[in-house]
Amino acid sequence: MVDMGKKGFTLIELIVVIAIISIIVAIAVPKGTVSLSFKERRDLMELKRDILYARNMSITEVKRYSLDIHPKKNYYYINKYVKDDGNDREIVKKKTFESDLKIITVNFNGCNNSEFGQLLFNTSGAPSKAGNIQLRNTKGQKISLTVEVATGKVNIYFDGVKQNE
């Protein structure tokens, strides 16, 4: 015999409550870029813009541009190659990170390098090699900026998860 006087929750009521809580938690969980401090986010976005700037300038000026990245010293240069032989170049910009964002390694030649890395754009705006720049923020998250070889498109990954900007 079933006693109808007992109080409890039906399975449907439990599923509805769990679904509502799941939706609230999914909305409240911050994305990877939100967990960055303001200065870290600004430095990361500036690095991405500088990569795109070097690519675009190499197309518009029909000159080679490069980013010379120095992980140990935590800075990079944007260089413009004045002559086609590659020996004469001028520094367009030098950037040292203002935040605690650290460059860990650079990989544009098939191996990770913690000393120096160069991203070189030819006159059509294509990078000479695809690769990535590995960074770490104050929370210990691994941030990777990848550059695709044919297009020079820059993607940002936080702990291996691609971010939509």
Image (cartoon, helix red, strand yellow):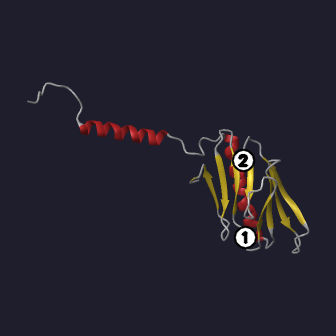
Q: Which residue is mark 2?
A: 43
- The answer to whether 100 is drawn above or below residue 85 in the figure is above
**Residue 125 got which mark?**
1
| In-front residue for pair 28/69 | 69
Residue 33 position within the rendered picture, expressed as x and y whole percent measured from the top left: 60, 46
Q: Is residue 35 above or below residue 113?
A: above
Label 2 residue SS = helix
Residue at figure coordinates x 68%, y 66% from the top left:
152
Q: Is residue 164 left or right of residue 39?
A: left
Determine whether, in the image, residue 130 is placed left or right of residue 16.
right
Q: How many marks?
A: 2
Q: Position of residue 131 (x, y in %)?
A: 70, 62
Position of residue 77 measured from the top left corner of the image (x, y, whole percent): 82, 56
Figure quadrant of the N terminus = top left
Q: Is residue 133 left or right of residue 6?
A: right
User: Which residue is most to the left?
Assistant: 1
Q: CA distance from mark 2 to mark 1?
A: 23 Å
- Type of amino acid under label 2: Asp
Q: Quadrant of residue 147?
A: bottom right
For the residue marked with disc 1, what is the amino acid? Gly
The residue carrying pointer 1 sits among few (fewer than 14), some (14 to 19) or many (20 or more) residues within 10 Å by Cα, namely many
The furthest residue to the right: 88
Q: Decide: few, some or many residues near mark 2? Use Cα within 10 Å; few <14, some 14-19, many ≥20.
A: some
Relative image position of residue 62 (x, y in whole percent): 79, 73
**Front-most of residues 165 and 87:** 87
Q: Quadrant of residue 69?
A: bottom right
**Helix, strand or loop for disc 1:** loop
* Tag 2–tag 1 contact (CB < 8 Å): no
When the figure is inspected, residue 121 is found, relative to residue 38, above or below; the finding is below
First in sequence: mark 2 vs mark 1: 2
Q: Residue at x 61, y 49 (%)?
A: 158
Relative to the observer, which residue lies in front, 152 or 14? 14
